[in-house]
Amino acid sequence: MSYLLRTYNLTKSYGDTKVVNMVNMNIRKGEIYGFLGQNGAGKTTTMRMLLGLIKPSSGEIEMFGEKVKTTSYQRPFKRIGSIIETPGFYPNLTGEENLEIHRRMMGVPDKKAIYRALEEVGLSRARNKKVKAYSLGMKQRLGIARAILHEPELLLLDEPTNGLDPIGIKEVRKKILELAHFKNITVLISSHILSEVEQLADKIGIIHQGKLLKELDSETIRKMNRRYLEIRVNNENKAAVLLEKKLNIPDFQVVEPGVIRIYGEIEDATMISRLFIEQNVDIYEMNVSKDTLEDFFVKLTG
Ligand SMILES: Nc1ncnc2c1ncn2[C@@H]1O[C@H](COP(=O)(O)OP(=O)(O)OP(=O)(O)O)[C@@H](O)[C@H]1O
Ligand SMILES: [Mg+2]
């Protein structure tokens, strides 16, 4: 699968501070990329650069297989849909009128695209209401409608569930999954909430103080949330051989000298301890735990 969006050492400085610092993002076509970071980590700034709202200080951006001219604000706008921070609308126009402006700007010939987009986000009934009379959640939904109206190939969503109620959050999540899986739209979604990103993303990029610390693929994410049995022994090499050869347990890992983790559901831990003792492997400690992505995130970002 090819990359739809990549950055190379993307950097933005304000004064002496690099608020986005040498970021290398790799987003594949059709992927949902969760961009995770605490407040002030640099998510919005990165997304603004991708969208051409601000100019990078240095580094490069590649979109749809082509280098973007980062010294200009030009971007392939018609192929991109976005919500950056709180979406802005004309308050005295209705939801429908606001989308009509966007439709014309994007050169979408079919007027029905507006109604489809409103329907998608559950705003059909509120379409003739002025936006100033919309609730925060309704405005957020209208933002999503605007982002998808012109059927973009790439969606840049900066904390799109901000201000939504739990049901709204769930609906947006479902919508994003649908767009990615059925329409093959590539999605970059930022959030400071791990659980939200975790439920959606095929890949997670963790940004902290302007640096992209890690990109985790779905396989790694899945592995991270598994239960395991951790055994502390005097001889991990011998223990490893016993697990593999005598017990046919393939899925384990020596995580540090003397410590073995056996992944998956362990039906009979006594069988393991009995064998170890018989074979003169001393057991100092044995316990079942679970690695969570949360632990990892906390450890990584201090
Ligand atoms: N125009 C600007 N001038 C100076 N500093 C800025 C500017 N824009 C952003 N910053 C700083 O850059 C850092 C990153 O901000 P950014 O908005 O990208 O964070 P974020 O990850 O989106 O955070 P949040 O989760 O709060 O939205 C912050 O420290 C912010 O104060
Ligand atoms: Mg932000």
Image (cartoon, grey):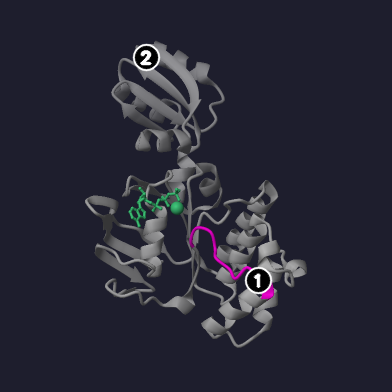
Instruction: Give the residue type that dot 1 points to.
Output: Asn
Above or below, 217 relative to 103: above
Q: In percent of the image, x 27 and y 58: which residue is there?
A: 11
At mark 1, the secondary structure is loop
Closest to the observer, 109 or 289: 109
**Residue 272 seen:** no
Name the residue at the right extreme.
Answer: 125
**In terms of secondary structure, what is the magenta stretch mainly?**
loop
Residue bounds of the magenta highlight: 84-96
Instruction: Give the residue type that dot 2 points to.
Output: Gln
Q: Which mark is residue 92?
A: 1
Number of the front mark, 1 or 2: 1
Closest to the observer, 79 or 55: 55
**Mark 1 Cβ and ligand 2 under 8 Å apart:** no
Residue 280 on image: x %, y % = 35, 11
Instruction: Give the quarter of the figure containing the C terminus.
Output: top left
Residue 216 on image: x %, y % = 40, 48
